[in-house]
Image (cartoon, rainbow, N blue to C red):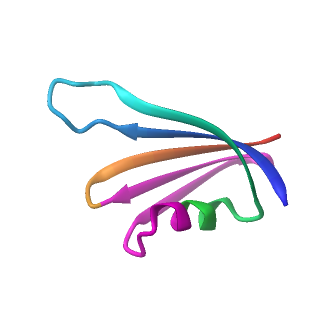
Amino acid sequence: MAEYELVREIQNSCSGNQMRDVFFEEIETDDPVAYVRNLLRADKAELTVEVKDADNLTVFADCSGMTQKFLFTRI
């Protein structure tokens, strides 16, 4: 299994509040996209993946109008 540093950003949709919730953790997974899908437990989440290079990728998740960003960096 590959080790990643994961940065998860959850945009705040409240009007007048531009802050985001940001969480950091180290995880082990062979499939970052499957990790996000399992974490959200939402089969209807729309996932978009941007691959920067072999060790970095970003997954954007749209769950019922709430957007989350998952940044994976291989350790």
Q: Is residue 16 left or right of residue 66?
A: left
Q: Position of residue 2 (x, y in %)?
A: 83, 55
Q: Say which quadrant the N terminus sits in.
A: bottom right
Q: Is residue 56 left or right of residue 64?
A: right
Q: Height in image: 17 above or below 33?
A: above
* Residue drawn where x is 41% and y is 32% of the image: 21
Q: Nearer the viewer, residue 39 or 63?
A: 39
Residue stretch in magenta: 37-63
* Residue drawn where x is 35% and y is 38% of the image: 11
* Residue drawn where x is 39% and y is 66% of the image: 45
Q: Position of residue 31 (x, y in %)?
A: 71, 65
Q: Height in image: 13 above or below 49?
A: above
Q: Height in image: 67 above or below 64?
A: above
* Residue 59, magenta (yes or no): yes
Q: Nearer the viewer, residue 74 or 29?
A: 29
Q: Height in image: 72 above or below 12?
A: below
Q: Is residue 23 left or right of residue 61?
A: right
Q: Is residue 62 left or right of residue 32?
A: left
* Residue drawn where x is 54% and y is 67% of the image: 38
Number of labels in the image equals 0
Q: Say which quadrant the C terminus sits in.
A: top right
* Residue 46, magenta (yes or no): yes
Q: Position of residue 30 (x, y in %)?
A: 77, 64
Q: Quadrant of residue 52?
A: top right
Residue furthest out toward the left:
15
Q: Position of residue 23 (x, y in %)?
A: 53, 35
